Amino acid sequence: MANQMKEKMMDYSSRRQFLASASATALWPFLNLPIAEAGNRRSSFVDYPFKLGVASGDPAPDGVVLWTRLCPQPASDDGGVPPEDIQVQWQVAADEAMKHIIRKGFATAAVDWGHSIHVEVEGLEPDRSYWYQFKVGMDVSPVGRTRTAPAADAILANFRFAFASCQKYNDGYFTAYEHMAQDDLRAVFHLGDYIYEGVGNEGDAPTRYFDAPEATTLQLYRNRYALYHADPHLQAAHAAFPWIVTWDDHEFANDCAGAVSDDPAVSTADYLKRRAGAYKAYYENLPLRRAALPMGPDMMLYRRISFGQMIDFSVLDTRQYRSDQPCETKYRTPCDGIFDPKATMLGDAQEKWLCEGLNTSGARWNVLAQQVMMARPDFVYKPHKEGEITFCMDKWDGYHVPRTRLLQYISDHQISNPVVLTGDVHRNWVNDLKVDFDNPESATVATEFVGTSISTNGDGTEGKEIAEAVKAKNPFVKFFNSERGYVRCDVTADEWRSDYRTVPYITTPGAPCVTRATFVVENGQSGAVRA
Ligand code: FE
Ligand code: CA
């Protein structure tokens, strides 16, 4: 990988010379073929076309999705790409040097899809690493590494992955990804707020400000993804592991809920038109399968990803189908609206799919990879009325009935080792999940690991006093920490370990990364214990 990065630093002409050398010709035997035989080998880009890097995602036992997007000028509206469909070659190798090619082919980087490419490679072997690369004209992409899932009946010794969320570019550097890329992982889960749609010149780190209005159109969302993808640390983490992504609100609009705009001046039709642009840009910019192809303002993002008999991930979408947040103010004292029996967080179809999947799963660990906090804490660090409790209407708190229904289902059906992974809140938390949060003695039916942000909210301000206050008010909270970072999980048949990996600052680059805390869940015993 180090060579890859160095290579990336070369200017365009020297890179071309380097890549046109004998070794590159050996890697790409069709390099010198006449155009008619090698397809449309366009080489008239104004600059290096793979500036957004490469990615892979949604691993299956026999394949994976490969992604890239041609974009020689990330800061320009058209990306610097000619307004035509472009043929791109791809290949998958069994080795990092790309000598033993297993699969190869052509894919179209279509104008209509922002010159993105999604190749669903099939016919690979389960549970092994592969390397991949793209080529267009004389230009070859960096080499990415990926890994297929184990066979459905495979018994694994362990499964090691990371999850992350909330990477507001204007708030700081993606230092956590610099460290994650060096980690030893089979996959990365992203739980949302991959981009932030707001204006570019506000936030917590002026050095990362940029000149852009709030994203409201397909073009503006595309531009925002180009800005983010150009980040070298985000690229390195994508190039190192397959990612499984789901969105939260900021890929579209702050605190979005279903098709309801908070602004009465915006019609439902206009709101859904904006959502169509946001969803399309999301699909274009992430390694998703065809099953997720957006249809206008709708996109099927929830899905199940399994790794042998060890672990099933139900990847959820808590934004597209939810009913509107109750009770106006976001952080507030409990109100009647949170007990609305008709409220929904997942929508009927997704909730049914989730419950059926959990109930029929044969996996040792059953994970909900989702967005907003499921536990019911008193947010003591938010605006507070003397002697009152403060809930957050945007999280499962605002949806008491569906939360209770889901946790009751998990309890009644004795789902094997349920674990909830959460993003959104820009803090690290470890929570016991209970059907009855008011009774500290009641059974813990699942474990929740909440991961902090990669960069959102800057360096992280709340210290030990607030952490102690959070835990004192909420007996089901085991850990609270406001540093930036990611969570690494190492799972065996006997136990789940979550390492809270944190960086002390992100408003300047180069911070070290430490394991701030480790929490363990024993097989058959919901609730985490600090190691
Ligand atoms: Fe966020
Ligand atoms: Ca969010």
Image (cartoon, helix red, strand yellow):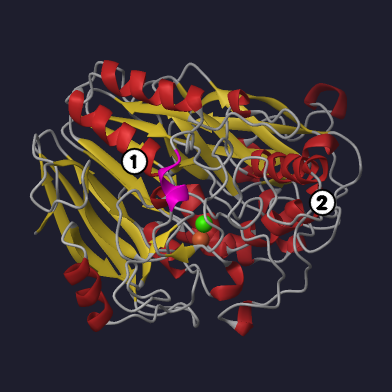
Residue 62: x %, y % from top left: 43, 19
Residue 255: x %, y % from top left: 58, 55
Quadrant position of residue 220: bottom right
Q: Secondary structure at mark 2?
A: helix
Q: Which mark is residue 21?
A: none
Residue 181: x %, y % from top left: 41, 56
Quadrant position of residue 308: top left
| Front in this rendered view, residue 364 or 142 | 364
Q: Which residues are magenta?
A: 336-340
Residue at 81%, 46% (x, y): give it: 267
Q: Which residue is mark 1?
A: 186
| Front in this rendered view, residue 291 or 439 | 439
Where 258 falls versus 168 (above or below)?
above
Give the number of marks: 2
Q: Secondary structure at mark 1?
A: loop
What type is the residue that disc 1 sits on? Arg
| Front in this rendered view, residue 195 or 68 | 195
Question: In the rendered view of the protein, which quadrant contains the C terminus?
Answer: bottom left
Q: Is residue 339 magenta?
A: yes
Q: Is mark 2 within 8 Å of ligand 2?
A: no
Q: Which residue is mark 2?
A: 219
Residue at 81%, 26% (x, y): give it: 39
